[in-house]
Amino acid sequence: MNASVGFVLVVLAGITTGTYFLGLKYVAPWKWENIWLVYAVLALLVMPCVVAFASVPHLGEVLSLSPAGAVGRVFLFGAGWGIGSVLSGLGVDRMGMAMGVSVLIGIDAAIGSFVPMAINTPEVILQKKGLVVILSVLTLLVGVALVGVAGKKRELAQASARTSNQQGSFRSGLVICIFSGIFSAMMNFALAFSQQIVQSARDAGVSQAGALNAVWLVTLMGGFVPTGIYTGYLLTRNKTWGNFTLPKTKTFWLVGAGMALLWYVGVVLYGRGATDMGNLGAVIGWPLFMAVLILASSVSGFATGEWKGCGPQAKRWMGAGLFMLMLASVLLGIANQI
């Protein structure tokens, strides 16, 4: 294990995952359910299956040797994360990338970090390392709060000219993103509490990376269940199945593939990086992953004109929030070296 290499991998994971939402901006006249189904099929089923079967010999046997309770638990964590994933798409669609992602990720980071630390390594909580992690997460939450203020001020400044791809109010988007953050933390639970599956794979001669790919396969298959059900429901209710065959939309399939690739690569990098960071990898790596993800999504939001015409006050609040997120990342780097 190399904690420094793991730290870098988690940072790269945050960058790739923090930019995959961009595809939502460029697929009109497709609706949210169209692009989300393409993304979900590729990111949650096709890519995990291909990678797992390629890297884990006798995959079915490896999973059958794992305790059924462990596999079921990881699958259910994945399903919980899938609910959060669906909500994240809806929340970001209403609030915009910079604001929506920041709120849901702040909650996600706090729950996803504290729960594994309290269950797996409770003795660390009052040690120097644990206290620095707690300080880091609190700093991250302050940054998220500042970004939230900036987002509200931006909405007020742009109230008379909301873009067509942001549907709904700030309030409804905020509620959706809060619940998304709670459920989305279960992605980290799947990794943090997957030791029995990893050990079964390692006992069968599978590499560490392959063992993690098996974990992600189970997790993401669970995640696809609520995602597939909800998007299928929307496609039927809104009669948008036909959008897949609209003229001049063939490139949208590539947009969905790009979203899926960015997101899946980020997940794989996170899993490998958190593992390299040691016993507290899921505790330190998760909030770091979230902080970098917010930074990346916020920069993307600025670059794509999301904050155009919002006024200097909103930008100052946003700048202060991003500074706190960077500070949180630095503190997590310190915790990683203690």
Image (cartoon, rainbow, N blue to C red):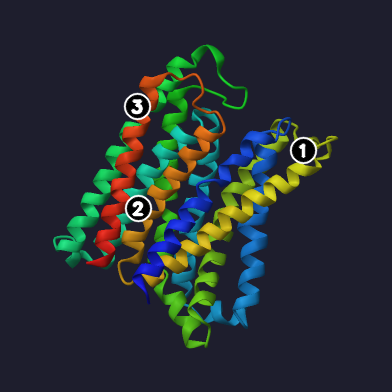
Q: Report the residue marked by disc 3.
A: 316
Check contact, mark 1 vs mark 2: CB within 8 A. no
**Quadrant containing the C terminus in the rendered view:** bottom left
Residue type at numbered disc 1: Trp
Dot 3 crowding, Cα within 10 Å, few <14, some 14–19, many 20+ = some
Q: Is mark 3 on a helix, strand or loop?
A: helix
**Quadrant containing the N terminus in the rendered view:** bottom left
In x, y percent, where is residue 235?
71, 37
Q: In this rendering, which labeled residue sits more in front, label 2 or label 3?
A: 3
Q: Is mark 2 on a helix, strand or loop?
A: helix
Considering every residue shown, the one lying at the far top of the view is: 160
Q: In this view, does 42 lie to the left or right of 104?
A: right
In x, y percent, where is residue 68?
48, 73
Q: Report the residue marked by disc 2.
A: 287
Q: Distance between the residues labelled 1 and 3?
A: 43 Å
Between discs 1 and 3, the one toward the N terminus: 1
As drawn, 183 above or below 242: below
Residue type at numbered disc 2: Pro
| Closest to the observer, 10 or 216 | 10
Dot 2 crowding, Cα within 10 Å, few <14, some 14–19, many 20+ = many
As drawn, 188 above or below 96: below
